[in-house]
Amino acid sequence: MKEITFSQRSLAAAGLVLALLALGVEALGGCGACRRGTSETLVIAVVGTLGYAALVATAWTHRAAFFEIGVFVAAAVHTVLVVWMIVRREACPVCIGAAVVALANAAIALRHGASLGLIDRVYVPATLAASGLVFGAI
């Protein structure tokens, strides 16, 4: 059984903190990088917070396979959100921080033995799905 490292658990917890911060920012009207607190961006913040809560819970219960899948889904979603910020030519420091955390966690997972197959079996399909959902919602 693979072990979920302290750094991976810490990054998942940092992602949850950033998701909660993003939820608070969106609830108060948004930062401007999205659409200034529209209901669609608030839904994205709520789903992100729930996703990171599930990721942290998965880490606590030592479900390494599910944790790795969640890490790559988070990395995919944040990749799409970074592309959205680039397209809009606006940057949200909270979202950039969360993207760094998500991508770092994926890199650490690969470094600690996660299958490269997660890239084509999880990351790529999740990126495509998130693209449709995010660009459709925003």
Image: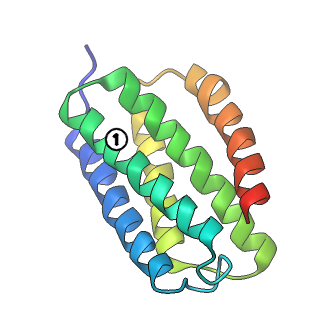
Q: Residue furthest front?
A: 39
Determine whether, in the image, residue 64 is placed left or right of residue 82: left
Q: What residue sits 47% from the left and 30% below the top?
A: 69
Left or right of 129: which side holds 6? left
Residue at 62% in and 35% down? 123
Q: Please name the colour scheme applied to the rendered image.
A: rainbow
Quarter placement of the N terminus: top left
Does 119 sit above or below residue 37?
above
Q: Secondary structure at mark 1?
A: helix
Q: Is residue 88 visible?
A: yes
> Which x, y percent locates residue 7?
26, 47
Give coordinates of residue 54: x percent, y percent: 34, 41
Question: In the picture, residue 127 is in which quadrant?
Answer: top right
In the orientation shown, which residue stands out farthest toward the top? 1
Residue 24 % position (x, y)? 39, 77
> Which residue: 63% across, 86% down?
32
Placement of 48 over or under 64, stated as above or below? below
Indicate whether 133 appears above or below 40: above
**Residue 112 appears anywhere in the view:** no
- Residue 70 in the image: state x and y as whole percent: 45, 36
Which quadrant holds residue 37? Answer: bottom right
List the residue tagged with mark 1: 54
Vertical relation: 24 (above or below) 127: below
Callout count: 1
For residue 122, side relative to residue 127 (left or right): left
Identify the residue at image location x=47%, y=42%. Answer: 107
Where the C terminus falls, by quadrant?
bottom right
Mark 1 residue crowding within 10 angstroms, few (<14) / some (14–19) / many (20+): some
Amino acid identity at mark 1: Ala
- Quick one: 114 or 135, which is closer to the camera? 135
